[in-house]
Amino acid sequence: MAYSAPIFYGAVRDYIDLVIMIFSLIVQAVALIHCLTQRGDGFQAIGTLPKGAWAAILAVCIVLTLLFSGPIGIFSLIGIGAALVYLLDVRPGLKDLSDGKGFW
């Protein structure tokens, strides 16, 4: 009975890593898609980085997460951080700028 614990631990850890990786990629993809669908002049109006810079940051983070990082790797954490900054800071500013109108 005690011999099966390490095998069970490995399987559970693999599933948790997979769920975290999928969540990370979804958050980053949502941020990138939202960035690409917004007008470029809105970014300058709210006083943040230009649209191209945000799109490049988010796209590079997704690529680095897929290629070089596990779910808890440094690139994945940086990508989640960048996506959350975009979604929690820039997105509401863009929404306020357009009076709450729009698809998102």
Image: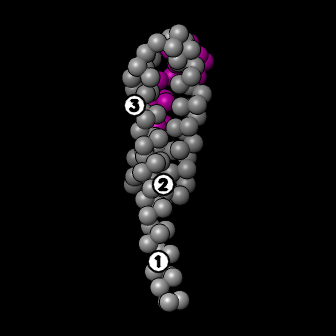
Image vertical order of residue 66 relative to residue 1, above or below: above
User: What's the residue type where badge 3 is placed?
Assistant: Ile
Question: Disc 3 marks which residue?
Answer: 33
- Tell me if residue 47 is in the magenta stretch: yes
- Using the rendered image of the protein, determine whether residue 69 is visible from the camera's viewpoint: no
The residue that mark 1 highlights is 8
Amino acid on which disc 1 is placed:
Phe
In the image: residue 73, left or right of residue 30: right
Picture residue at 44% right of the left edge, 72% below the top: 11
**CA neighbours of label 3 inside 10 A, class few (<14), some (14 to 19), many (20+):** few
Q: Position of residue 37 (x, y in %)?
A: 39, 23
Dominant secondary structure (helix, strand or loop) of the stretch shown in magenta: helix
Assign a secondary structure to mark 1.
helix
N-term-proximal mark, 3 vs 1: 1
Which of marks 3 and 2 precedes in the sequence? 2
Q: Is residue 16 above or below residue 99?
A: below
Q: Nearer the viewer, residue 38 or 56?
A: 38
> Looking at the image, which is closer to me, 19 or 53?
19
The residue located at (50%, 51%) in the rendering is 76
Cα separation, mark 1 vs mark 2, equals 18 Å
Alpha carbon separation for disc pair 2 and 3: 20 Å
Instruction: Report the residue at 45% width, 80% height from top.
Output: 7
Name the amino acid, label 2: Ile
What kind of element bears circle 2? helix
| Label 2: how many Cα within 10 Å (few below 14, some 14–19, many 20+) | some
Picture coordinates of residue 42, whole percent (x, y): 50, 14
Q: Which residues are magenta?
A: 41-59
> Which is in the foreground here, disc 1 or disc 2?
1
Q: Residue at x 49, y 30 (%)?
A: 54
In this view, the residue farthest toward the front is 1
Classed neighbour count for the residue bearing mark 1: other residues with Cα under 10 Å, few (<14), some (14–19), many (≥20): few
